[in-house]
Image (tube, rainbow, N blue to C red):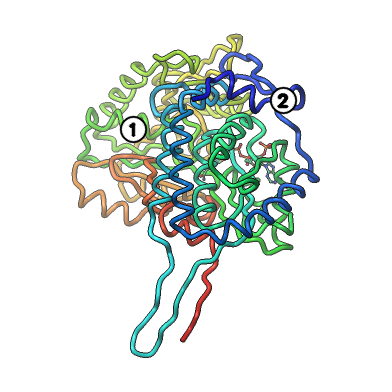
């Protein structure tokens, strides 16, 4: 079992890009600033290693993933502390310890899926479909769930016999380096590599002719750049991009019963979650009761430095994200919307803390409603006509998740059937599961992660017909 200090010392360098704790401004260390030449070298050695790795059976690769999960668990506390210090998220709540636990859980679940291979057979045909590895997978990730999203990319890629070259966000490289160091205790050499650095490293990876598939999670704007950069090589893509998920409360919901799940649906990871609820539509008849119950949950949810065991909300991870949230809340307040709780951050205090904020009586066209805030500020929009609320939920050019909140499952399903999104949750929001496919529509991206459907995206079907 490694300690936090040992783990940090094993991945941070003497110089390079300096990394800071977003809650305190404390310097954690440095990481290398990679170059296109580093990407070339990583792709070349990955390709060589992949040829041998591809010869392993599904069972052998699953066994490696199981061992990788054990290695994560053996180092869980050190990984969680590093994640908390670098990303800012608290140890407790659905945050750092939860994220490290999810890494182990995703590795085990991915190891246990059936192989996607099958035989298509009837009286006239017999075709054997075998999913073969693609080769080298380039994995580019964001700063909000740096370890978990890395595992979402790594686990299916390895299970299907590919090698992986990762490029973490420049805001959270140490978390990914540490995770990969732990995974590499059990993986064959060069099968999983990381090149740290800025967007130009991601650009080099996404335009690289030696990369057979790109898994990208991040903003829609960067997703478009990656699609353009990879076009010449016709590189396969899975793009998990931004969202602006709507939740719709129906008029038979119980405000007190749903308030806790509404809170975590919106404010998990302090709102910095792709499939978090980012706008909430509430019927006039329940409006005051839902707002009041929600405010009570916010008041009982402490925000602060991640290593304080009491906190469940942390800072925004970086200044740019703080400024986005601040701008959007100001736009709401300037338009005459009502602050139920939060807003008014202390600009002079250390750290990028933005108070958990609920905004009522807001115009449905306000920027806080129609733009992705990616932080702890939720607009609550009043409605009188359910069809109007459904139309509003579907009105944006993104479609990652959505949710319906109701005491009547049949009614909830009926509304869910009308929502345009990759996933619609009932009485929950953002609850992803390795056994359930996940992906977006519209500008939220394409391709599917998780479950056997996810495995299929990391291989190509080779068919023997006859
Ligand atoms: P970005 O798109 O800014 O960055 C994501 C990654 O892409 C980073 O590693 C970044 O590197 C890299 N990158 C930057 N420029 C390029 C380029 N030209 N070519 C290739 N890679 C590049 O996203 P954020 O990290 O800011 O994450 C927040 C956004 O991601 C939000 O919009 C959110 O909705 C979305 N997101 C979506 C998720 C999903 O599953 N759909 C999950 C999580 C986030 P660097 O950091 O060094 O610039």
Mark 2 close to ligand 1, CB under 8 Å: no
Q: Which of 378 and 389 is in front in this view?
A: 378
Query: Which mark is in front, 2 or 1?
Result: 2
Tell me which numbered mark, 2 or 1, is placed earlier along the sequence: 2
Q: Is mark 1 on a helix, strand or loop?
A: helix
Q: Is mark 2 on a helix, strand or loop?
A: loop
Q: Residue 13 carries which label?
A: 2
CA separation in Å, label 2 and label 1 = 42 Å
In the picture provided, is 268 more to the left or to the right than 123?
Answer: right
Q: Nearer the viewer, residue 23 or 362?
A: 23
Above-or-below relation of 2 to 123: above
Disc 2, disc 1: CB below 8 Å?
no
In the picture provided, is 196 more to the left or to the right than 387?
Answer: right
User: What residue occupies the far top of the structure in this picture?
Assistant: 348
Identity of the residue drawn at 40% across and 76% down:
119
Residue 333 in sight from this viewpoint? no
Identity of the residue drawn at 34% across and 85% down:
122
Q: Residue 275 carries which label?
A: none
Crowding near the residue tagged with mark 1, few <14, some 14–19, many ≥20 C-alpha atoms within 10 Å:
many
Q: Nearer the viewer, residue 58 or 276?
A: 58
Q: Position of residue 208 (x, y in %)?
A: 74, 55
Q: Position of residue 394 (x, y in %)?
A: 43, 51
Picture quarter with ligand 1: top right
Dividing the picture into quarters, in which one does residue 379 lie?
top left
Q: Which mark is residue 262?
A: 1
């Amino acid at each position: 079992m490694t300690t936090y200090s040992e783990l940090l010392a094993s991945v941070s360098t003497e110089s390079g890009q300096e990394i800071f704790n977003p809650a305190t401004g404390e310097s954690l260390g440095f990481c290398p600033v990679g170059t296109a030449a580093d990407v070339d070298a990583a792709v070349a050695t990955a390709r060589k290693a992949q040829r041998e790795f591809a010869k392993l059976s599904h069972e052998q690769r699953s066994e490696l993933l199981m061992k990788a999960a054990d290695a994560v668990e053996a180092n869980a506390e050190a990984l969680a502390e590093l994640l908390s210090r670098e990303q800012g998220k608290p140890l407790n709540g659905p945050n750092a310890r939860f994220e490290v636990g999810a890494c182990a859980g995703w590795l085990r679940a991915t190891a246990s899926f059936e192989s996607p291979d099958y035989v298509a057979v009837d009286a006239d045909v017999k075709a054997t479909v075998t999913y073969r590895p693609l080769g080298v997978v380039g994995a580019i990730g964001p700063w909000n769930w740096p370890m978990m999203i890395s595992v979402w990319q790594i686990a299916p890629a390895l299970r299907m016999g590919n090698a992986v070259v990762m490029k973490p966000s420049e805001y959270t490289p140490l978390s990914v380096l540490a995770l990969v160091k732990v995974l590499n205790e059990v993986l064959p050499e060069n099968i999983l590599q990381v090149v740290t650095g800025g967007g130009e490293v991601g650009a080099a990876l996404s335009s690289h002719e030696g990369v057979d598939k790109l898994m990208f999670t991040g903003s829609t704007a960067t997703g478009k750049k990656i699609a353009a950069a990879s076009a010449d090589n016709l590189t396969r893509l899975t793009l998990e991009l931004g969202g602006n998920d709507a939740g719709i409360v129906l008029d038979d919901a119980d405000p007190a019963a749903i308030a806790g799940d509404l809170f975590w649906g919106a404010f998990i990871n302090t709102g910095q979650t792709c499939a978090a609820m980012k706008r909430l539509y509430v019927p006039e008849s329940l409006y005051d009761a839902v707002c009041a119950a929600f405010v009570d949950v916010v008041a009982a949810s402490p925000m602060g430095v991640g290593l304080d065991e009491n906190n469940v909300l942390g800072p925004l991870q970086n200044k740019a994200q703080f400024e986005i949230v601040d701008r959007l809340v100001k736009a709401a307040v300037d338009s005459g919307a009502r602050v139920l709780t939060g807003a008014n951050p202390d600009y002079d205090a250390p750290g990028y803390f933005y108070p958990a904020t609920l905004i009522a009586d807001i115009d449905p066209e306000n920027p806080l409603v129609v733009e992705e805030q990616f932080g702890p500020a939720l607009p609550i929009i009043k409605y009188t006509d359910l069809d109007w609320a459904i139309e509003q939920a579907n009105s944006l050019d993104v479609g990652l998740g959505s949710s319906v909140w109701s005491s009547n499952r049949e009614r909830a399903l009926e509304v869910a059937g009308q929502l345009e999104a990759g996933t619609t949750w009932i009485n929950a929001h953002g609850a992803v599961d390795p056994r359930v496919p996940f992906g977006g529509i519209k500008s939220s991206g394409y391709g599917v992660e998780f479950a056997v459907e996810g495995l299929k995206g990391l291989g190509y079907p080779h068919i023997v017909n006859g």
